[in-house]
Amino acid sequence: MQNTASDITDLLARVALRDRAAFSLLYQRTSAKLFGVALRILKDRTDAEEALQEVYVKIWQRADRYQQSAFSPISWLVAIARNHALDILRARRPMADDIDAALDIADGLPNPEQATVANAERGQIDGCLDQLEADKAEAVRGAYLDGYAYQELAERFDVPLNTMRTWLRRSLLKLKECLSA
């Protein structure tokens, strides 16, 4: 049988008048879809089956509230199923977590002392990079801070690949000397 909007609207109108046969037909024609909605939200077959029973109780009780101009009948039914499943999920969650649980959450940011040390080290590295020739310092930043490949840097600076490797190796040695001083 087809499940046209007018068929379901007619069934809802008859259910509003407490027609049990119409309610049975409505269930046969729409339960698979509403079960799918509940299952997708609740992710548990048993919970979805229980929710579906409760949804049809609500439909039986509220069929007279359906207004054809506001929603299609299947949208109205899906909204009831969706909202009921979401209500079940909300009821499962604890109302409020204990504030002390927040103390166990690690802060990924460095503490003030670590931040100060990191800033000092960063300043020292920048100072040592400034002592290199400008193109060599830019190549080091490109290779080790920006992630450029040696070949990309060689093309960028218009030098052979081996020359770029030499620049980087010698620059790192100079940086090591500067940082250890």
Image (cartoon, rainbow, N blue to C red):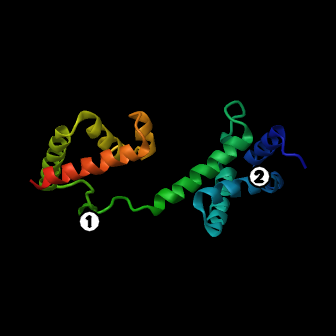
Q: Assess disc 1: are there few (<14), some (14-19) or many (≥20) residues with their C-alpha within 10 Å of its C-alpha.
A: few
Q: Of the residues tagged 2 and 1, which is closer to the observer?
A: 1
Asked if one can make out residue 149 in the rendered structure from this viewpoint, the answer is: no
Q: Percent position (x, y) of residue 149?
A: 43, 46
Q: Percent position (x, y) of residue 115?
A: 16, 51
C-alpha span from label 2 to label 1: 47 Å
Q: Percent position (x, y) of residue 134?
A: 25, 34
Count of number-bearing discs? 2
Q: Is residue 76 left or right of residue 115?
A: right
- Most extreme residue toward the bottom, as rendered? 46
Q: Mark 2 = which residue?
A: 30
The amino acid type, in three-letter code, at marker 2 is: Thr
The amino acid type, in three-letter code, at marker 1 is: Asp
Q: Is residue 90 left or right of residue 178?
A: right
Q: Residue at x 82, y 51 (%)?
A: 22
Q: Percent position (x, y) of residue 55?
A: 65, 55
Task: Choose between 79 and 99: the one closer to the eye.
Answer: 99
Asked if one can make out residue 73 in the rendered structure from this viewpoint, the answer is: yes
Q: Which mark is residue 104?
A: 1
The quadrant holding residue 130 is top left
Q: Residue at x 83, y 54 (%)?
A: 25
Circle 1 — which element?
helix
